[in-house]
Amino acid sequence: MTVEELVQSRREWLRNDGPDSEIVVSSRIRLARNAAAFPFIAKLSDDEKKRVIELLRKAVRKTTFGQNCSLFFMDELGGLERKLLVECHLISRELAEGEGPRCAMISPNGHFSLMFIEEDHLRMQCIKSGFCLQEVWREMNDLDTQIEKNLVYAWNQELGYLTACPTNVGTGMRVSVMLHLPALALTRQFNKVHNSLQKISLIVRGLYGEGSHAWGDFYQISNQVTLGLSEEEILSQVHDVVRAVIGYEKKARDFLLEENREKLEAGLEECLKSIRAAKTISAQETLKCLSAIRLGINLGLLSDISLDVVNQLMLQIQPAYLQWIYGGVESSLDASEFRAQYLRKYLLGIWNED
Amino acid sequence: MKQTKCRIEMKCQKCDKKATMHITDLVGSKPVELHLCAEHAQEYLAQTENGMSPVGGNMASALAAQMAQQMAFSKVSDEFSKSDQETCPVCGLTFFEFRANSRLGCPEDYQTFRKQLTPLLMNIHGECRHTGKRPSCFGEEDARKLTALIGYRREMSEAIETESYEKAGMLRDKIRKLESEAGIE
Ligand SMILES: [Zn+2]
Ligand SMILES: [Zn+2]
């Protein structure tokens, strides 16, 4: 499979058919692992990086996952292809922009991606649509257990899985749930989210922004602690908080529907109008619109646009994707023009204007 | 089985209460970690409600940078700078290098710099003992045996540099044997 095929194929986790997918966009688990026989990345020569890659490839190839995934060496990909993979959350920016031998193994449906020579020798992620942490963990854990049969991990009794940075030591596990919380934002009840995070060290981050701002009310909740708690304990902490937040968002949505329906409808109309008319549109503005549209669909105020399309567009309005489709995106102004054009086509079905 | 837990209570950065919220913010490219009590956390988050917190950064690296900063400015910094010359016998990383980059050089570093790392781990995780998954096939001993290879390889290249070819040859044989046992090409 090529990068373009991967990007083009409708990846499973965008399908928006997982549990609670009207609020939870995706559930993701990442594990950090290192081979015991080699130094961490900071002390790893390029020759040794190649040897570690071979060692990992061999170990992964013997697993059920390894048989049908694609391997991409970063140095063999063009800059645009690497950016596309980053925009689609299939590899990290760190891997894309790093130096020296490094690669990624990605499953055809995009559920799994394994990065070799990132911050650790091995970073594996499993991501699925909707709120399904247990299922994601089962699959991630299974792959990890298969790999460890063929590879000696850096591990000890006291500290667990040893990682290049002490922030990941122990389980090496980061659980992240991406949520769409427009109603909590609209009703200014975000403090409820933070109250539910109080007792444990979890982190909320805004997603999709370039500076310090969250665009489109997409937030990510993830664990901070990786040591001293078991994987199951971490999972259940994140699970409980997300469950509570889903409850708040649902209540806020009910409230909006009852009390503010007209205002919502007017806002939505405004949104569609601006997309219809815009000659240029920024990524920020687009995400604001997509957020409103997504909420509109979920509240039953909009029926002729599918959630699938909205989810896809969240990725496709990014610069590398636009460059891939249109070519010649040299400035952010170009990107804004193409973005406006793309949105009219795929969101509103206006094909023949330009 | 009950593990001894050694939890340190962190104080809010704005008052004397216990810090229950740990927020990592990326402002521009600079990560800032905040430890706040419930009240101050709410106040802080209310300010940034619509443009919540960090985006686009990698949390671990944000934390790591914070950690390095903390070490640089905390009361223990004197003690830490005394450790700067301490060197891992296996990979050769100095504690100074770790302080500068927040990245360790090899698995053995957790042992070498144990004294300095324990308070850090307590700060980050609130605990210093793993209670989660353990590999089913290979354990601590297997890992330690292989990690020793990192040191042998370094010794070998030093031996070659100083033209101690006999020593280099012995090390090479030792390395080959260990590597082939472990299936490393
Ligand atoms: Zn306080
Ligand atoms: Zn070392």
Image (cartoon, rainbow, N blue to C red):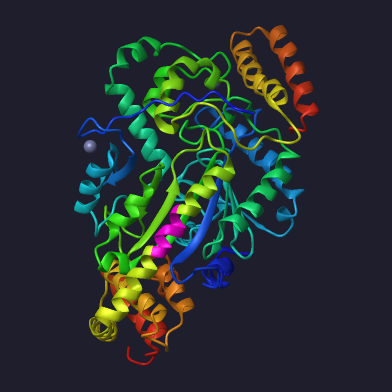
Instruction: Residue B116: tell me if it is visible.
Output: yes
- Which of the 4 image quadrants contains residue B183? top right
> Which image quarter is the N terminus of chain A in?
bottom right
User: Does residue B39 lie above or below A137 as drawn?
Assistant: above
Q: In this view, does A53 lie to the left or right of A294?
A: right
From the top left corner, tell me how far across and down residue A33 is, in percent.
59, 38
Quadrant of the picture in which ligand 1 is shown: top left
Residue beneath the point at 74% across and 56% down? A67
- Which of the 4 image quadrants contains residue A230? top right
Relative depth, front residue between A325 and B70: B70
User: Does residue A251 lie above or below A69 as drawn?
Assistant: below
Q: In the rendered structure, which segment of residues is drawn in magenta?
A: A241-247
Q: Residue furthest bottom?
A: A352
Please name the predominant secondary structure of the magenta segment in the image.
Answer: helix
Q: Is residue B17 left or right of residue A312?
A: left
User: Does residue A327 lie above or below A203 as drawn?
Assistant: below
| Total numbered labels placed on residues in the image | 0
Residue B143 part of the magenta-drawn span: no
Relative depth, front residue between B159 and A267: A267
From the top left corner, tell me how far across and down residue A152 is, in percent.
70, 33
Residue beneath the point at 39% across and 69% down? A250
From the top left corner, tell me how far across and down residue A245 is, in percent.
40, 59
> Which image quarter is the C terminus of chain A in?
bottom left
Residue beneath the point at 45% across and 17% down? B94
From the top left corner, tell me how far across and down residue B122 is, in percent.
43, 26
